[in-house]
Image (cartoon, grey):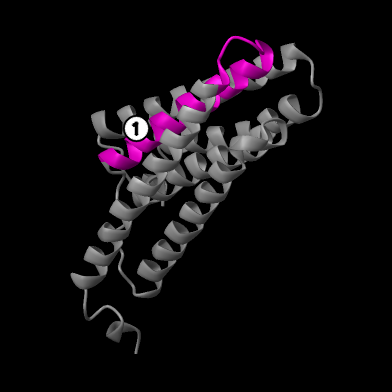
Amino acid sequence: MSKELTVPNFISLFRIILIPLYVYYFLFNSAPSHYIVSGIIFVISGFSDVVDGFIARKFNMITNLGKILDPVADKLTHITVAFCLCLKHSYLIGLIIILFIKEALMLTGALVLRKRKISETPSAKWWGKLCTVVVFITFVLEIISLVFVDLIPVGINYTLVGMSIIFLMFSFFNYLKVYFDYISKNPDSQRRKV
């Protein structure tokens, strides 16, 4: 169990702890300074996501717990930020619905792998990372637009949201294939339960 207590895993836990702090600054005071603080918290979370991945790979600290904690921190952060932004920008409703459906279905896929006793957890793929970057940039610009209202044209906002939805669906269908591949490579996994 001590092998799971690594620096990257603690950073992932730190990112989860940042979520309620973001919500507090974003929702409980509409002053521009509070939006700025919530934006800084979100950027810190995104930066620490890059750092924990780098440390895990560089120092061979990749663990099964980390493969769960890192995406959980990502998903919780993105869904929370999307929901908060949705309260300010109604055009983000489609994005949060797609994001929620994608994450719910991916969680279901992970539970199916666990139920089938498939111990190996799929690691993050390039399309998942790319999707995270696109969604991250979109959310940062949406937060900025709350502080500097006329800085970002509405057309750019709509374009970014559309791109995020496309990347979310692209990432989802690619991960879906990965989950099916894991199951097909372990055809006897269901029988092990019996």
Amino acid under disc 1: Gly
Residue 36 among magenta residues: no
- Say whether residue 44 is visible: no
Q: Is residue 39 left or right of residue 4?
A: right
At mark 1, the secondary structure is helix
- Picture residue at 32% right of the left edge, 28% below the top: 55
- Picture residue at 51% right of the left edge, 58% below the top: 104
Measured as percent of width and height from the top left, residue 46 is found at: 47, 26
Question: For the image shown, how many numbered marks are present on the structure?
Answer: 1
Residue placed most toward the observer, 115 or 160:
160
- Picture residue at 38% right of the left edge, 25% below the top: 51
- Say whether residue 22 is visible: yes
The local crowd at label 1, few if under 14, some if 14 to 19, many if 20 or more residues have their Cα within 10 Å, is some
Residue placed most toward the observer, 6 or 85:
85
Q: Quadrant of the C terminus?
A: bottom left
- Picture residue at 61% right of the left edge, 34% below the top: 81
In the displayed orientation, state which residue is furthest to the front. 155
Residue placed most toward the observer, 148 or 106:
148
Image quarter of residue 86 = top right
Measured as percent of width and height from the top left, residue 42 is found at: 56, 25
Q: Magenta stretch: dominant SS?
A: helix
Residue placed most toward the observer, 101 or 93:
93
Give the answer, above or below, for where 159 lies relative to 126: above
Measured as percent of width and height from the top left, residue 138 is found at: 49, 27
Give the residues drawn in magenta, as a range: 126-154
Residue 131 among magenta residues: yes
Measured as percent of width and height from the top left, residue 116 is found at: 34, 75
Which residue, given by chain and number where applicable, does mark 1 sit on? 53
